[in-house]
Image (cartoon, helix red, strand yellow):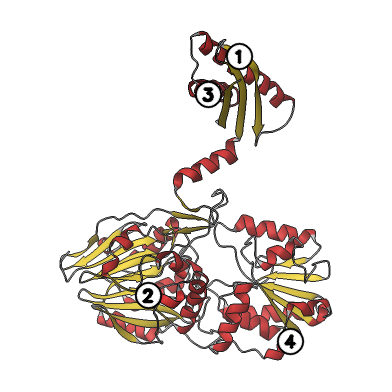
Amino acid sequence: MPDSAVRVTFLGGLGEIGRNCCAIEVNGRLLVVDVGLMFPEPDMYGVDLILPEFTWLIEHKDRVDGILLTHGHEDHTGGLRYLLGDLRVPIYGSALTLGFARHRLEEAGLAKDTEFIEVADHERRRIGPCDVEFIPVTHSVPSAFALALHTPQGVVVHSGDFKLDQLPIDGRRTDLARLAALGDEGVALLLSDSTNAEEPGFTQSESTVGPALRRLFLERPDRRLIVACFASHLHRIQQVLDAAGDRKVVLLGRSMVKNVELGRRLGVLRVETSALADPAALERLAPADVLVLCTGSQGEPLSALARLATGDMRSLDLGPHDTVVLSSHPIPGNEFSVGRVIDDLHRRGAEVLHSAHETVHVSGHARQGELRTLLELTRPKAFVPVHGEYRHLVHHAAIARRMGVPDEGVLLCEDGDSVVLDDRGFRRGPEVPAGFHYVDGHTGDIDDRPLEDRRMLANEGVVLIAAGVDAELGKLVAWPTVSTRGWFDGEQETTLRHRCAEVVAKAIEDALAKGERDPEALNRLAKRAAGRFLGQSTRRSPVVLSAVVSL
């Protein structure tokens, strides 16, 4: 690739919510933008996290000059601990974003060997051969950035996750003036958040949540209040603290405690120490005197809210005198987990409020009106929608065309694709490996094969066959037993097992009569006979395990 060319390689976040990661190549050097993770779907049994495929990055690690973090959410920073073991480069971000990242890297034992470089709003910094400008944007976490990379082919703007909140909690607005000035200078390529590209209008301001919380709290003066939200959503946490009034606030969940401490230290959160109480105080505080702020708004199994919902929290036993507010919306893929926690809360008699009932949550992502505004301000020559499921990317691409970006300047990309800007124009580049990388907390990294095996076990069940033969006499001496796991019980299954045993017995006897004595061969015959019979009888393909032994 010529030195003057610019290539953007997408490693995650295009076709799914999460795993956001791309690499921008300038003069043969690479800058990585975000290293996120994704949470598993319900049918990804045993999988804890899903990461981008880092193979290509690690192969080119000697060309990487740094990692740029747009903001502190896990879907943009959560993969760092898995990449930095193989790729040690400086990390650039706001003080708050780096604080969140440092927490995770400390847990992994990687923080002490990592260089964290703090950047401020509007700062322009030379990183490798590229000038990088950090532009303030509003999102659901404070101190988020859009990035403007000044390259030989012009300015490449990466929006990060953003919305245009005119009344942000901290007064830090998206810098529309600077984005418009970049548009006047000429934006060669815009990469823009697509999460809400299907939604018309404009996203509500974060400041609309506070009044709703205050009203709900005032309407329940005698009830204990439990609010669950993202521990990184410090603006939401600030509004909960403000609405708490004279109630003592108890923090539950390790990340909630750490992030509130970080927010207070950086001046992002304003709360007096006297307003906070230790969880041990819950035993003596009257319900009307306490507000619990906890993690678990996404139904995470080991989170504080999930443990409260199942009665597994010694310091607090939920009941009919409690009101639980889920100040969040389920991330795609988490709907089942969140619904299960809500059901468990109702079983304990608690009142449960969430965004379907009240304005206790607003999105941090731009809707169609804001996406059009960004396109109008920057007027890019080329455009690639990023950060979203494929339908979101399609809708965003259509918006860009309606806003005047020429058809040849709009490319729909997926993970593993790349685009190139050079003297010949804008076009697709080579593909790189970019599949899902699964992390299983018990066995380490896994690939698609064991995951497919787990799906088969869950969907089809297991059939166990045991039989005994006398190899010298060539006879079946222990009639086959057939047992199942993951199948229904009842008379039909009993009949099916008896018939399956007869089929297996005949297959073994026929093989013995023909002189077969090898235990492995007999086991293969037994498995094949059982699998064929069960497939024809039930149209299912269970995992068949056989133990034909010589007695």
Q: Residues within 10 Å of mark 1 (few under 14, many from 20)?
A: many
Callout 3 amino acid: Asn
Q: Which mark is residue 476?
A: 1
Three-letter amino acid code at the position of disc 4 = Gly
Measure how far apart labels 1 and 4 are at the Cα level: 79 Å
Report how far apart the C-alphas of labels 4 and 2 lie in the structure. Answer: 39 Å
Q: Name which residue lies at 38% across and 57% down.
A: 53
Under circle 1, the secondary element is strand
* Mark 2 or mark 1, earlier in chain: 2
Mark number displayed over residue 523: 3
- Which residue is denoted by mark 4 in the rendering? 245
Q: Amino acid at mark 2?
A: Leu
Q: Tell me which corner region of the image, top left, top right, bottom left or bottom right, holds residue 294.
A: bottom right
Q: Which residue is mark 2?
A: 68
Circles 2 and 1: CB distance less than 8 Å? no
Mark 2, mark 1: which one is toward the viewer? 1
Q: CA distance from mark 1 to mark 3?
A: 13 Å
Categorize mark 2 by other alpha carbons within 10 Å: few (<14), some (14-19), many (20+). many
